[in-house]
Amino acid sequence: MAVVTYVEAIRQAIWEELERDPAVFLLGQDVGTYGGAFRVSAGMLERFGPERVRDTPISESAIVGCAIGAALLGMRPIVEMQFIDFIGLAFNMITNFAAKARYRWGAGVSLVIRGPSGGGVHGGPFHSQNVEAWFAHTPGLKIVQPATVRDAKGLLKSAVRDPDPVIYLEHKFLYRRLKEDLGEDEEILTPIGRAASRRAGDDLAILTYGAMVHVALEAAERLSREDGAEAEVIDLRTLSPLDDEAILGAARRTGRILLVHEDTRTGGLAGELAARVCESAFEWLDAPVLRVTAPDTPVPYSPPLEDAFLPSADKVLDAARRLAAY
Amino acid sequence: MDAPPDLLRHTTARLSEKQLLELYRFMLMNRLVEDRLGKLYRQGKIVGGLYSSFGQEATSVGSAYALRPGDKIGPMIRNLGSLLVKGIRPREIFCQYMARAAGPTFGRDVNLHFGDLQRDCVAPISMLGALIPVLAGMALAAKMRGEDHVALTWIGDGGTSTGDFHEGLNLAAAWKLPFILVVENNGYAYSTPTGMQMANSRIVDRAQGYGVRGDRVDGNDVIAVYHATARAVHRARRGEGPTLIEAVTFRMRGHAEHDDAGYVPLELVEYWRARDPIARLRRYLVVNGFASEQQLDAMTEPIRAELEADAEFALSSPFPDAALARGGVVAGDGDPRGAARLAQGSSGWLS
């Protein structure tokens, strides 16, 4: 038995990739001596040394820029953002340098930028954000967000081996709440660009990702128990590029689509998902596409405020009922 | 602006006659390429803007010439001369400026925004300062692999106000990376004079704050620029960390061709015209017996002929097929440039 947490799966993925490929290295604030703010790199400095496990100045733009330069020469850097909120400080490097290099001059930038995202831990406006929409609009970037322990490991290992820049969003609410037996000797690689169905159901489909997968699953169980309606739950896993086959397949199978994300509403990924469903599966739809998202506000700190902000199983269940009854 | 009082004295001890003539040839070529580009611009053949390094040729050529193959450069808009030193051909520059399919980005990006890692060149982005952390990262890669390559990039006086200047130089210093930053203090950031950009326009003073070696040189003296860079390269290869070189020079044209630079006092232009870097090296070569006037004059015609052929090549090259607008955003998405390269009958300029 090898039961591990979500955060331990992340640690294992980095460890294994450092062991596998000497070009892989880790850089970020306090990743070395301290082992990372969430202990993701605990023990790595001792095992791999200060060249490959690098404590950096508090300079997100230079950290990412430096990683880009190293990647251009064939290194495989993994950048840790101590909290993903700080990725905004490296926005130019990511969207203008890394994302456009291949298109402009044929230079692939194999780079992983990862960090704790999401709310539910009362981190306040600057330690709780979901940043996927900031980057999903930029061609040339891949974005993944694991919802399970297995994918936490498998998506990160795939990201490290990907020839393009990958933003890996780990949900800090899941860090120590999720546990799974990953077996012993199996190499876990989750393909980038492929969604996964987490629950079967014919009456409607909930498309979601990250921590909201678990909220959607809870809502789907209650819908089944209390109303006898069955919701399929699709875990997108990769947010860019989107898995159109899985998204449109769910729309065609069920005719009713509920989109759920923890990110705020306007300009969030649900809008793009709805557009794709309406453009390409309109004739299969029996109801309007609905969204459950956070409202258009910053993430508040106090528990009752944050609870009001975050999509809950109650809110998802309510929307699912309306959709099923339409 | 007075000539800086503390310029490094230069010596030609380590430059042979052949090298001195090569420096002259690269600077001359730099100027003639830009002359030809100016003509193309006035003929409406250049799709976007045209940026000139007229008067600053020494800072690009002198610093790039101190490097060897494998050392990486991140050239900016006025560092055309460094590309020539690294082996980029004028026809690539012409095709790129004219947005032709035969250009190094197949028409996807503008002016000097192209790169070729086989020839050590990184494509810049328009956002100033970004090359500093990126080239520091290339220096890091060399260091991690135990190679003795260095990485060098340039920034203008205006660009030193960016966050990336600070973050990149500080990180390179903290990690003692084999990295060289040449600050071309050319008096103006577009229309903003250096004195309005910063309180202390002796940019070299910042080196001490970052804990790196700082040198201030006459940026119109190619030999001084070369030696300052060569020293910095030597230190970098020995593991002694980055150097900031402030090269004091002047932008003799507007920010770009559309800008008549009416905000620049004429006496300032005249002051610097008398210190033209090509004329200065020419005088030096003749006075010290390295070459005769006739020998130097004779260098112009073959370059002009080559540039004429290259301009003709670019002018007769087609614009890119619309299919080239898509693909190559990420790996495996059907990059049409592979096919385009075959159609050109060329192995391609990109790595």
Image: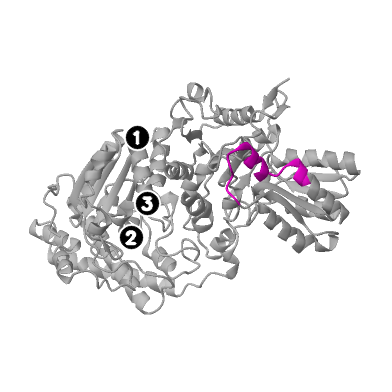
Q: Are marks 1 and 3 on the same chain?
A: yes
Residue bearing mark 2: B80
Nearer to us in this view, A42 or A13:
A42
Give residue B339's position: percent from left, percent from top.
Answer: 59, 61
Residue sitting at 27 percent across and 66 percent down?
Answer: B31
Left or right: residue A68 compared with residue A325: left
Residue bearing mark 1: B174
Q: CA distance from mark 1 to mark 3?
A: 18 Å
- Residue B145 visible? The answer is no
Query: Could you classify mark 3 by the number of other residues whose Cα lies within 10 Å: few (under 14), some (14-19), or many (20 or more)?
Result: many
- Type of amino acid under label 2: Leu
Earlier along the polypeptide chain: callout 1 or callout 3? 3
Earlier along the polypeptide chain: callout 1 or callout 2? 2
Element assignment for label 3: loop
Nearer to us in this view, B210 or B281:
B210
Give residue A101's position: percent from left, percent from top.
Answer: 50, 53
Q: CB of mark 1 within 8 Å of CB of mark 3?
A: no
Residue bearing mark 3: B129
Q: Which residues are magenta?
A: A297-316
- Type of amino acid under label 1: Ala
- Residue A18 visible? The answer is yes
